Image (cartoon, rainbow, N blue to C red):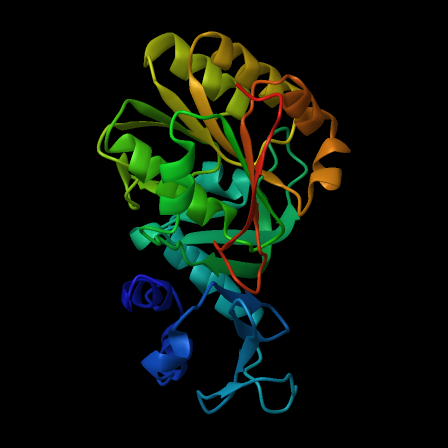
Amino acid sequence: MQGSTSFETITSYLPEKLRRLIMNIPCDKLSGLMEFRLRAGGALYLVYSDKISFLRNDGGLSSYYNKKEVYNVTSADIKETVERLCHYSVHSCGKQLSQGYFVVENGVRVGVSGAYSSTDKPVLTEFTSLNFRVSRCVEGCADEIFASNFDKNIIICGGVNSGKTTILRDMCRLNGNIRKTALIDERNEISCLRDGVPQNDVGAMTDIISNCSRSAGIISAVRTMSPEVIVCDEISSTSDSESIISGIGCGVKFIVTAHGTCFDELIKRKELAYLIESGLFDTIVFLRGASAPSKIREIKRLKNGN
């Protein structure tokens, strides 16, 4: 976590009663915080890489769920928090409520779940839970990959909460400080743009394209920004893969992430098999997993790479 700043940002959006309880949590208990979750009718809990802690009614933390002892989140708590996120103008936040998330100060991203309207452009109208995700900038975590794979096409792979985005963000920073880089930040998770300014350090020369599909962003970057390298998160469709291969054909290097814990998992997915079998990617990096976020398990060289 970025010191106490991210936590203070989270608490600033909470109802006063809840904020007072949470401010009792000792700073040492916040180290390594990844997610801060609230669910109406359920608990408020903190998610770490190796544990979950529940907020008690007295402001302390418990490692297990006991309905009588933990704080029971109300629908009013959720509603007031959403209103604070919207600065008390819910109707002005149609875009965020259609996408199901907000990006606030210090790179904190807030996922919202609930019931969507039945209109032509559905938006959230009833709110059931919130997930404040703490954006982690770990400078230096990608040094090993960067040093040994400069000017290579790279796929970074791992399971849920393995630190793929954290590694990718640092790779973007390292590249963006020395050469023209384009970041395709589809859901604004990497740069955390706010008012046009990235809340996270993604490199001095990095151009950011956000809130559009990866494939459209890649095409736009190649046509308009003349990047030497393009960075993008979570390859998930054949259109993504086709755009990447087209970009490589234009002389651009790519650093991407994908969900998968081993090589066999990757090649079972059409879009990733397409990239690997193209012979255009040099390296696949596998991360250890949620128990050791952003730590490398294996760097696999592809025989048919450039």
Closest to the observer: 213 or 38? 213
- 278 vs 130: above or below: above
Residue 99 % position (x, y): 53, 39
Q: Is residue 254 left or right of residue 124?
A: left
Looking at the image, which residue sits at the far right? 268
Residue 135 % position (x, y): 40, 54
The residue shown at (71%, 26%) is: 273
The residue shown at (50%, 31%) is: 154
Q: Is residue 254 visible?
A: yes
- 284 vs 104: above or below: above
Closest to the observer: 113 or 274? 274
Q: Is residue 172 left or right of residue 274?
A: left
The residue shown at (57%, 40%) is: 123
Residue 147 % position (x, y): 36, 38
Image quarter where the N terminus lies is: bottom left
Residue 210 % position (x, y): 41, 30
The residue shown at (40%, 83%) is: 21
Q: Is residue 156 left or right of residue 204?
A: right
Closest to the observer: 153 or 117? 153
Query: Splitting the image into 4 quarters, where does residue 220 fall?
Result: top left
